[in-house]
Amino acid sequence: MKKLISYASISLGLFLFQLVYHHFSHGVSAASLQYAWIVVACAGLIWWLISRWFRFKSLRLASNLYHSGLACIITWCVLNGILEIAGSDSPYLWLYLLCGGGFINSSLITLGLKGTRMI
């Protein structure tokens, strides 16, 4: 339950951030910034379901990898949205998606590995 509350508060914070940012952007909007809070909400729900599915397995490494990947993807969403609104671009933004996807895939791979069971 604590995980759901933390994901909900992070989603709310991102929603309020994009609301204020769009208010002061003179009518210009960016989809990646506007929907970043939905990415967090869906990722939180997915991780909550995964933790329920694998509740007898130690999830520390998978959790750290998953949350690092999620942080990379959210950073990409926010930076991409801010740069879109500013009318600029960066050739390095794709690295955030690459690292985020790699971390999340590594997390899912570690879930499939046979590990020690907690009693």
Image (tube, grey):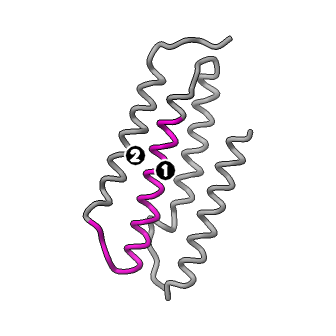
Question: Along the horizontal axis of the image, is 105 left or right of 8?
Answer: left
Residue located farthest toward the left when viewing the structure as drawn: 91
Look at mark 1 in the image and give the residue it sits on. 71
Residue at horizontal 30 percent and vertical 72 percent from the top: 89
Q: Please report the bounds of the magenta region as a residue range.
A: 64-90
Question: Along the horizontal axis of the image, is 28 left or right of 118?
Answer: left
Residue 44 rendering spot, x and y as whole percentages: 59, 44
Quarter of the rendering containing residue 82:
bottom left
| Relative depth, front residue between 39 and 58 | 58
Label pair 2/1, CB-CB below 8 angstroms: yes
Residue 77 rendering spot, x and y as whole percentages: 44, 61
Residue 100: give its label.
2
Q: Main secondary structure of the magenta part?
A: helix
Q: Amino acid at mark 2?
A: Gly
Compared to residue 53, the image places residue 44 above or below, namely: below
Q: Secondary structure at mark 1?
A: helix
Residue 81 rendering spot, x and y as whole percentages: 43, 69
Residue 105 rendering spot, x and y as whole percentages: 39, 35
Whichever of labels 2 and 1 marks the residue nearer the N terminus, that label is 1
Residue at horizontal 63 percent and vertical 55 percent from the top: 10
